[in-house]
Image (cartoon, rainbow, N blue to C red):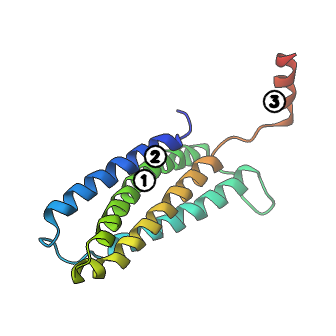
């Protein structure tokens, strides 16, 4: 399993933005106001994954006062990070498409939905960043012996 590609996240976000724009242009007005619970939930997940990234990095580096990290926990964090980065990219694309359409549409209902859509976009982007940081934190650090072996092979 390799690291998450940024291009994969961008393509997912663009596809979700296109679908959101299409759906909102066809069905806007038939739905209630945009709720605040999803952006709040996504923001909470971003905070939790950001904390897990910092804690995991410190535990992998075996900083003083930190217990060693369980390898199975790290594997679970990697799976969580990969899944949530893709899901957050899709949510970010959806909220971006929704936000773009709302900014073009100047009805009272659209203006009222802009803050919730913008909050959803910001929270989703925060979750993408936190998930990528968590994935990066789960990498095994290189030891000085590994670097010396790589230079010996290159010569």
Q: Is residue 130 left or right of residue 34?
A: right
Report how far apart the C-alphas of labels 2 and 1 lie in the structure: 6 Å
Quadrant of the image occupied by residue 148: top right
At 49% from the left edge and 41% from the top edge, which residue is drawn? 7
Query: Where is 3 relative to 61, above or below?
Result: above
Quadrant of the image occupied by residue 111: bottom left
Mark 2, secondary structure of its residue: helix
Do tag 2 and tag 1 residues touch (Cβ < 8 Å)? yes
Residue holding disc 3: 146
Q: Is residue 99 left or right of residue 137?
A: left
The mark that comes first in sequence, 2 or 1, is 2
Within 10 Å of disc 3 (Cα), the crowding (few <14, some 14-19, many 20+) is few
Residue holding disc 1: 89
Within 10 Å of disc 2 (Cα), the crowding (few <14, some 14-19, many 20+) is many
Q: Nearer the viewer, residue 144 or 102?
A: 102
Query: Where is 99 relative to 109, above or below?
Result: above
Mark 3, secondary structure of its residue: helix
Report how far apart the C-alphas of labels 1 and 3 lie in the structure: 34 Å
Residue 4's spot in the image, x, y percent? 52, 41
Q: Image quadrant for the C terminus?
A: top right
Mark 1, secondary structure of its residue: helix
- The tally of labels here is 3
- Tag in front: 3 or 2: 2
Residue holding disc 2: 9
């Amino acid at each position: 399993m390799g690291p998450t590609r940024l291009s994969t996240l961008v393509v997912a976000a663009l596809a979700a933005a296109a679908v959101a724009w299409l759906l909102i242009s066809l069905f806007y007005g038939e739905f209630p106001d945009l709720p605040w619970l999803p952006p709040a939930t996504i923001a909470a997940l971003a905070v939790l994954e950001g904390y897990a990234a910092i804690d995991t990095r410190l535990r992998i580096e075996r900083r003083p006062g930190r217990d060693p990290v369980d390898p199975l926990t790290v594997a679970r964090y990697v799976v969580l990070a990969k899944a949530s980065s893709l899901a957050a990219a899709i949510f970010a694309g959806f909220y971006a498409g929704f936000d773009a359409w709302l900014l073009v549409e100047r009805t009272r209902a659209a203006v009222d939905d802009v803050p919730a859509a913008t909050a959803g976009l910001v929270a989703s982007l925060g979750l993408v960043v936190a998930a990528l940081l968590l994935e990066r934190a789960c990498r095994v650090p290189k030891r000085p012996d590994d670097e010396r072996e790589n230079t010996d092979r290159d010569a």
